[in-house]
Amino acid sequence: MSPYKFICFSKPNRRMLFLLIASHLLWSCAVFGLWSTGRLIDADNLWWSGIFIALQLYAAAQLLMPALLLHPEERSRGFYLFWGLSLAVFIWLINQFSPSGTWQPLLAVVKSGLLLLVATFVGAAIARYVNHLWELVPICLVMTLADFTSWLYGPTAGFTQQIKEHYLAPAGQPPLVDMILVKLAFPGFAALAPVFGIADWIMVVFFAVVAGRYEINDNLIGPRGETLARQGRIGFYLPVSVVALIGAIVLAQTTGLFIPALPVIALIMLLWYALRYLMSRCFND
């Protein structure tokens, strides 16, 4: 078998991948600009923090649109192994740089854009293996139980404490788990702050792509994301999964607890699909 089979993409998908990479770079530049502006704003105002989070994640939602147009291709385990290892090594390498001054936040936003990009690839790849919509129920339940258990008793509890201690009183190198945390701009902060992990965005993409595959409109402010993507209408896409992530972040910020976003996203998506099912039954009856 030719090694080319492990790395090649179809022509339509190459175009979508180029759009994904370019849009994530633009998003990183926008976050850097927001960070620069935010340094002039009072950090004690919680409303400003909420606006900053909403703006950055609303912009990130638009990054999902090219992923909705990716064409399914037959892939081998070697393909996923090659790209999985390559992306993991790239994330590790870029985290070995520790610049100072203005370069530090600039590199931080590039890292966050890279994590979102990798998460988009992974989420879209996983979504294609959902053969029936009802499979989301056990996926959400297992995801919720596993993450809450890890947060209460498992490794997530230790990671959370390490991150909290590092950012409240920075000393030495950040913990290893910091490499997979997406950092966003906050008003009044000298640096970007970790907000959620790469796994959270993987599931955001997963739910959005599954909805697209089954022609379900998960966009809260307009037509389906795939329709908008084909029309080139950027700025009108806000899927339920992104709103769920925003809700999880706001919950963590208001309570002061490092509540994992993954179970919150899963529960909100379950409730949303259950509500859709009940409404469809009522209208059909």
Image (cartoon, rainbow, N blue to C red):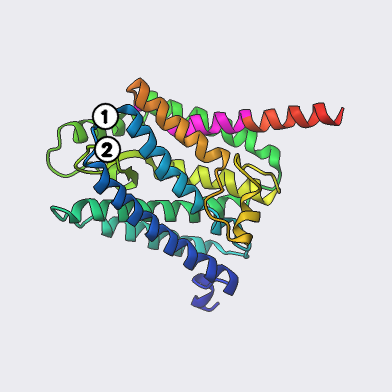
- The residue located at (31%, 56%) in the rendering is 110
Q: Secondary structure at mark 1?
A: helix
Name the residue carrying label 1: 161
The prevailing secondary structure element of the residues shown in magenta is helix
Judge whether residue 268 is colored magenta: yes
In primary-sequence order, the first of circles 1 and 2 is: 1
Q: Where, by quadrant of the figure, is residue 96 drawn?
A: bottom left
Judge whether residue 188 is colored magenta: no
The amino acid on which the numbered mark 1 sits, given as a three-letter code, is: Gln
Name the residue carrying label 2: 187
- Viewer-proximal residue, 175 or 77? 175
Quick check: can you spot residue 260?
no
Q: Where, by quadrant of the figure, is residue 252 drawn?
A: top left
Single out the residue that lies furthest toward the right.
Answer: 285
Q: Is residue 214 above or below residue 54?
A: below
Read off the magenta span.
258-271
Left or right: 52 as drawn, with respect to 79: left
- The residue located at (43%, 43%) in the rendering is 57
Residue 185 on image: x %, y %: 30, 43
Q: Secondary structure at mark 2?
A: loop
Label 2 crowd (10 A; few <14 / some 14-19 / many >=20):
many
Residue 170 on image: x %, y %: 15, 37
Residue 222 on image: x %, y %: 63, 45
Label 1 crowd (10 A; few <14 / some 14-19 / many >=20):
few
- The residue located at (58%, 74%) in the rendering is 11
Image quadrant occupied by the C terminus? top right
The amino acid on which the numbered mark 2 sits, given as a three-letter code, is: Pro
